[in-house]
Image (cartoon, rainbow, N blue to C red):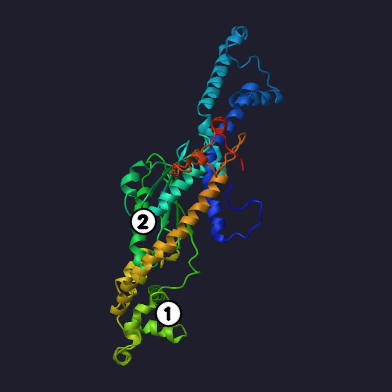
């Protein structure tokens, strides 16, 4: 095994716990075929081995109740070649009822797997109408993340049993996910989506595009089934805590409190809820006056050209236009961000990337300049930090899924740290001169022993 031991006591963060629990939930989906197979086998052993099929058992219970109440039955509910004499000696209705009960038991055997699956899903609170059998996982993120996570999950299940395995696919939500995979979405497909942090103006459009691609897949549902379980199942991972409406979706928000604030984030937080506002320059100066220098906030150096220059001009402009009497440019944005929940309560969707973009379009010139100059900084943060954290989160979640699948009942577990691809190093012998070739030659006998040993050990796997 790789990683830390499960027996070691460790302090789990909230995010880690959510990722592990999500892996356990999806592990129940993957383990379902084998669990149902065992349940069906137990039912067959009891019903056939002990002669207690469910419908016949129910009929026997009714007859026992009649006997307890004093009603005497003059016939037997049987049908079959072994009961020919009994069938001839009694009224045909007794035989007809016995035939009907046996046909009902046969139908139960035919649909036994489906019946047990529905009971199991209802008991565990999982989606009812997902397709039965092997599950498919689709990882959606930027290219390097979805490709590496695809290989990671494939390696985890490379030695798995056929009845506890996954089909793994991956795609880029900003590129080919919609075109390559949405036409293959069926009930019960597991889609894991990595989302950029749309609270930053440079990433708001990217997150909106990813969410739109996810929604296109989410609303592909079977019309014969009602409810959200008639479509795919989603988990989204990202730093933005906004949870979209996509049917069966669970969002795991990564911790972004350990990093500093960006300049456009400060503007958004300060100006978002104000019906009337001052200029962006006034907000940034007020932050600096509160004891925070511009270097404490990412991207504040972009505002140095106008933040502390032409101060007299700005003060003069504020005397003509008082700060709290400017045009109410944020009223529309605030109204857009308030939605009604099913229970009638107002929900504040300040983190919605669409609301973030609407806010950006209503900033003054200085605010737009700060946002425009911060876009490259946002892209650098996404490519070097945020995407790496999402990759680690995916690895934690799918590792949890694998360790809850690799030891199925009544079977030997497989090693999730290994695959069929044993190490093969294709190298060329280092060239040597003719002068020292004789000293480097190995005797023929030693070569024969080495070849024999190699043939004996071929395919041998060392268990660490």
Residue 253 x/y as whole percent: 48, 60
| Residue at the spot of label 1 | 295
Foreground of the two, 279 or 201: 201
**Image spot of residue 317 (x, y percent):** 29, 90
**Residue 52, above or below 265:** above
Evaluate whether residue 335 shows in this view: no
Q: Residues within 10 Å of mark 1 (few under 14, many from 20)?
A: few
Q: Where is 327 relative to 404, above or below?
A: below
Q: Position of residue 8 (x, y in %)?
A: 66, 54
Which image quadrant for residue 95? Answer: top right
Tell me the tag on residue 203: none
| Numbered disc 2: secondary structure | helix
Figure check: 176 above or below 101: below
Image position of 369 (left or right of 402) = left
Quarter of image, res 285:
bottom left
**Labels 2, 1: front one:** 1
Sequence-first disc among 2 and 1? 2
Of residue 429 and residue 20, the one placed in the foreground of this image is 429
Question: Are the residues flagged by discs 2 and 1 in contact, CB closer than 8 Å?
Answer: no
Q: Relative to 405, is 380 above or below?
A: below
Q: Which residue is mark 2?
A: 210
Circle 2 Cα neighbour tier, 10 Å, few/some/many (<14 / 14–19 / ≥20): many
Q: Is residue 57 visible?
A: yes
The C terminus - image quarter: top right
x%, y% of residue 43?
60, 28
Give the CA distance from mark 2 to mark 1: 32 Å
What is the number of callouts on the image? 2
**Secondary structure beneath label 1:** helix
Residue farthest to the front, as pictured:
435
Q: In this rendered view, identify the residue nearer to me: 15 or 228.
A: 15
């Amino acid at each position: 095994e790789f990683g830390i031991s499960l027996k070691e006591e460790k302090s789990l963060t909230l995010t880690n716990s959510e990722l592990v629990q999500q892996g356990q939930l999806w592990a129940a989906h993957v383990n379902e075929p084998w669990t149902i197979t065992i349940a069906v086998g137990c039912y067959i052993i009891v019903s056939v081995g002990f002669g207690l099929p469910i419908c016949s058992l129910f009929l026997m219970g009714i007859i026992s109740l009649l006997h307890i109440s004093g009603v005497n039955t003059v016939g037997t509910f049987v049908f079959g070649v072994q009961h020919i004499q009994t069938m001839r000696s009694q009224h045909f209705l007794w035989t007809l009822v016995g035939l009907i009960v046996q046909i009902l038991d046969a139908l139960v055997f035919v649909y036994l797997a489906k019946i047990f699956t529905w009971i199991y899903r209802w008991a565990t609170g999982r989606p009812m109408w997902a397709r039965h059998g092997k599950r498919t996982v689709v990882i959606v993120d930027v290219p390097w993340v979805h490709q590496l996570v695809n290989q990671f999950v494939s390696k985890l299940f490379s030695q798995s049993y056929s009845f506890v395995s996954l089909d793994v696919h991956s795609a880029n939500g900003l590129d080919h996910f919609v075109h390559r995979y949405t036409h293959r979405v069926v009930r019960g497909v597991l889609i894991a989506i990595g989302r950029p942090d749309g609270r930053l103006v440079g990433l708001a459009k990217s997150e909106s595009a990813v969410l739109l691609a996810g929604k296109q897949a989410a609303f592909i549902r079977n019309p014969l089934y009602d409810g959200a379980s008639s479509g795919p199942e989603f988990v989204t991972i990202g730093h933005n805590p906004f949870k979209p409406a996509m049917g069966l979706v669970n969002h795991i928000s990564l911790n972004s409190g350990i990093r500093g604030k960006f300049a456009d984030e400060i503007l958004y937080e300060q100006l978002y809820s104000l019906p009337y506002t001052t200029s962006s320059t006034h907000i940034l100066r007020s932050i600096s006056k509160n004891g925070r220098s511009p270097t404490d906030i990412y991207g504040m150096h972009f505002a140095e050209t106008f933040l502390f220059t032409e101060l007299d001009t700005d003060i003069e402009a504020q005397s003509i236009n008082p700060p709290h009497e400017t045009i109410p440019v944020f009223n529309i944005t605030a109204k857009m961000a308030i939605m009604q929940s099913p229970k009638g309560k107002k929900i504040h969707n300040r983190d919605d990337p669409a609301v973030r973009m609407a806010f950006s379009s209503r900033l003054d010139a200085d605010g737009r300049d700060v946002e425009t100059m911060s876009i490259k900084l946002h892209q650098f943060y996404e490519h070097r930090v945020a995407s790496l954290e999402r990759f680690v989160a995916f690895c934690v979640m799918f590792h949890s899924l694998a360790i809850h699948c690799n030891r199925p009942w009544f079977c030997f577990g497989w090693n999730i740290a290994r695959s069929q691809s044993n190490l093969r190093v294709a190298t060329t012998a280092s060239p040597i001169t003719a002068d020292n070739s004789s000293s480097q030659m190995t005797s023929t006998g030693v070569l024969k022993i080495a070849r024999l040993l190699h043939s004996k050990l071929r395919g041998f796997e060392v268990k660490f």
